[in-house]
Image (cartoon, helix red, strand yellow):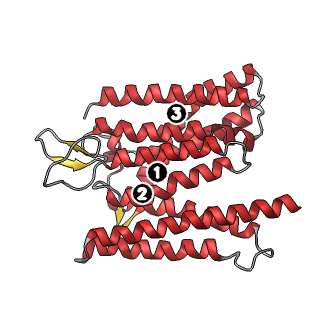
Amino acid sequence: MDMTSYLVMMAVSAVVCCCMTFFLLKNDGIAVKQAGLSAVLLLVLGSVLGFVCAKLLYIMLMLPFVRDLGMFFQGSQIDKLSYYGGVAGVVFAAFLVAKITGIPVRRFLNRFAPAGAFMAAMARFAEFYLGTLGVGDYMEEGGFFPLAVANKWGEYYLAVFIFEGLFSLIAMVLAFLHNREKDCFVRTLFYLCLPQIFCESLRNISISWLFVRAEQLLCYLFVEAVLIAWSLRIRGTRKQWYLPFAAGLVVCALTVGEEFALDKSDIPHVITYTCMVAGLVLLVVMEHWSYRQAMQVSSKE
C-alpha cells in the first residue's frame, strides 16, 4: 500500500475536477468570478465532505458487526471508508456550492456532471496504490496489467478497480454528450451506479450482509429510484409506463439470487455473471426508453 502516491493522485484529480467544473460553468455563461469561486469552494467542501461522508457511511454499514467504535479510527483510515459515501459527500458539496454562489442547483449539477464522473473514475484508478483493496479473485494462471495486478509475492488478482474506473469514464463521455439535458446529472449518476452493481460482485473485499453486498444494494436503490421517477413521468400517457421500475425490481431480486448462487451453489460463475450482466443491460434499455418517452411528453406540454 503506497499511501503517499494514492493521496497525491487523489489531490491532483480533485484539482483537475474543479478546473473542469470552472470551464464547464464558464462555457455555460456563468461569470468568471462566480465560476472561479464555485471551483474553489467545490475543492474545499468536496474534500472535507467527501471524507466525512465516506467515513460515516462506512460506520453505518459496518455497525451491525462491531461493538467497539474505536476500531473505526485506529490505524490506516483508507480501508475504513466507503467509496459511495465519498461520492455522496462530493454531490452534497456541489449542492452547497450552488446554493452559496447563487447558481441554480440543477444548472450547476448538470454542468458539474462530467467533472464529477471524471473524479469518480480517478478515485477508482487510484486504488492501484491500495494493494488488494480493489481487486477480485486470485488468478491461478497469472495475468498482466491492467487486467490483473500482483501483490508483493507475485500473485495476480483481477484488477476490478480498473473496470470500475473505465465504466466511470464511459459515464463521463455520456455526460459530455448529454450535458445540455435537464436531467444530465441524474442520468450520469445512474450510469455511474449501474455497472458498479456488477463490479461490486467481483470485488474480494466488500461489506456483506449474509450474501447481499451492502454497497451493491445502495447502487440498486438509486438505479431503481431513477427508473421510478422516469416511469411516473409517463404515467397516464403510455400503457407500459410501469415497465421500467418493474424491470428494476425483478432484476434486483434476480441479482440477490445470483449473489446467493455465487456464494452457495456450484453453478459456474460465468453463467451467473452472464445472467447478471444481461439484467443490467435490460435496465439500460428501460432507462433509455422511459427517458425518451418522458422527453416526448414534456415537449408536448
Residue drawn at (33%, 61%) of the image = 65
Question: Visible in this render: residue 210?
Answer: no
Dot 1 falls on a residue whose secondary structure is: helix
Quarter placement of the C terminus: bottom right
Please provide percent x and percent y for residue 117: 54, 42
Identify which residue is drawn at 50% across, 65% down: 281
Quadrant hosting residue 8 = top left
Find the residue positioned furthest to the right. Answer: 301
Measured as percent of width and height from the top left, residue 140 is found at 13, 55
Residue 31 position (above or below residue 180) = above
Q: Are marks 1 and 2 in contact (CB under 8 Å)?
A: yes
Residue at image coords 67%, 48%:
184
Residue for badge 3: 48
Could you say which disc has been placed on residue 57 in the image? Answer: 1
Q: Nearer the viewer, residue 87 or 199?
A: 199
Q: Marks 1 and 3, how far apart in space?
A: 14 Å
Question: Which residue is label 2 attached to?
Answer: 61
Q: Looking at the picture, which amino acid does disc 3 mark?
A: Val
Dot 2 surroundings within 10 Å: few (below 14), some, or many (20 or more)? some
